[in-house]
Amino acid sequence: MSMFELRVLQYFLTVAREQNITKAAECLHITQPTLARQLIQLEKELGKKLFDRGTHQIELTKEGMLLRRRAEELLDLADKAEKEIREESENVCGEIFIGSGEMKAFQSVALVMKQFADKYPHVKFNLDSGNADDLKERINKGLIDIALVTTPVEISNFEFIRMKEKDVWGIVMPTHDPLAEKDKISPQDLMGKKIIHSSRKLVREEIENWFGDAYEQVHEAASINLFHNAICLIKNGMGYGITLENLVPKDDKSICFRPFSPQLDTGSILIWKKHQNFSPATAKFIEDLKHAFKV
């Protein structure tokens, strides 16, 4: 036991204040024999007698009075350090860099961001957009901390939270197109048609699987990484855009969305790099995300 162990110094100061081992033990919620052994051990380590033990009360020796002053200083410093560390952790500040595609699940993430911002008003969020491959690359380069991406996506090098929301695949076309009269679109409906398709390899494979044999009968007019740019192509009749429903502008009446049949859903996940040393703000935000989404 070190003579500077704070717990033992607290024992010593309590006995010095109460001038009675029994009363001091009651204050400390330990047994009288335990307290007596700690004091004897402290005197043994210092090689000095700290107390004059009388019949009714205990008095400090000259060495005991010196130790009391130093012990009070040490405990005050320890208390101050604890408060400063706690205040530092509570006064979270800095920037958190998040990337996201456009998907339903971002609404849930945005709610956690708002709650975090209310709790830590000195934190600033920086939001970037892109597809899953772009955002993964930015995480690997250290440009962003966390990303919300659509599946399928390779995540072996990432920690992740799987979101519960699902997005629906379908096609976008001009509202006057004959296929717009249908409620749902089958692979056979697109045979012989031109399509505007994702440039992401894993997404392309998923869409091709949905088409089945009919995929050989469709023609790819263009590939894209962000759907916003495809809208102009669709409006100009270059092809039917394959996309997620929530990416289609609701206020643009010149185009419309029809879901696939059979239905094709896609999920989304929050990812961040494994074994990464994050800033205190980012680390706290990740913990809040885990708590919010029950990880």
Image (cartoon, rainbow, N blue to C red):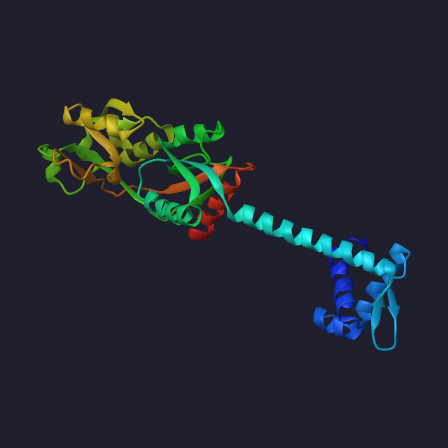
65 relative to 31, above or below: above
- Looking at the image, how many numbered discs can be counted on the residues? 0
Q: Nearer the viewer, residue 265 or 226?
A: 226
96 relative to 237, above or below: below
**Image point (35%, 28%), residue name:** 200
**Rendered-image quadrant of the N terminus:** bottom right
Q: Nearer the viewer, residue 291 or 13?
A: 13
Across and down, in percent, residue 235 comes to: 15, 27
In the picture, measured across the screen, residue 186 lies left or right of residue 55, that is: left
**Image point (78%, 75%), residue name:** 22
Across and down, in percent, residue 50 comes to: 86, 62
Q: Nearer the viewer, residue 155 or 98?
A: 98
25 relative to 123, above or below: below
**Image point (78%, 67%), residue name:** 15
Instruction: Please say whether residue 239 is visible from this viewpoint.
Output: no
Across and down, in percent, residue 267 comes to: 35, 42
Instruction: Please say whether residue 103 is visible from this viewpoint.
Output: yes
Give the image quarter of residue 154: top left
Q: Nearer the viewer, residue 161 or 156?
A: 161
